[in-house]
Image (cartoon, grey):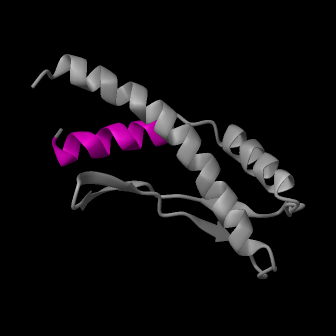
Amino acid sequence: MPREAAQRLLTDAYRGLDEGKILRLTHKLLRRRGIDPPLDVQYVADPAVEEVPEGLGIRLGTDILVYDEFPEMDDCLEAFEDALNDLLLARLDKMIRGWNKRHPP
């Protein structure tokens, strides 16, 4: 798959995700890990396709927007990355299978 096509699929997959679902899953993961997530934290991501030795990979480009740092900040970011990764890869996998059917080798 060409890099440009992969980036388009990734962008479409990310745009199609429900932000509320990502946030709920993030909070669920944090609670399972014994962390009470702050309610005023805003998570952002900028997924991009990048070349890796094995071919093409995904860089999530995640961050947290806060005014004051807090002790569990890294844990919150990790949970957000886990939630985003799970939801994004499931959606992207379906889109890639569809692309491969339309563009046989």
Q: Is residue 55 left or right of residue 69?
A: left
Location of the C terminus by quadrant is top left
Image spot of residue 82 (x, y percent): 61, 52
Name the residue furthest left: 105
Residue range (magenta):
2-14
Please identify the quarter of the rendering in which residue 87 is found.
top right
Q: Is residue 10 magenta?
A: yes
Q: Residue at coordinates 42% horizontally, 35% vertically from top-left?
A: 92
Q: Nearer the viewer, residue 14 or 105?
A: 105
Q: Residue at coordinates 73% horizontally, 50% vertically from top-left?
A: 26
Name the residue furthest top: 101
Q: Is residue 78 left or right of residue 61?
A: right
Image spot of residue 56 (x, y percent): 25, 51
Q: Nearer the viewer, residue 20 or 86?
A: 86
Q: Residue at coordinates 51% horizontally, 40% vertically from top-left?
A: 88
Image spot of residue 48 (x, y percent): 36, 55
Q: Is residue 13 magenta?
A: yes
- The number of numbered badges drawn on the structure is 0
Residue 29 drawn above or below residue 103: below
Image spot of residue 73 (x, y percent): 74, 73
Q: Residue at coordinates 48% horizontally, 42% vertically from top-left?
A: 14
Q: Main secondary structure of the magenta part?
A: helix
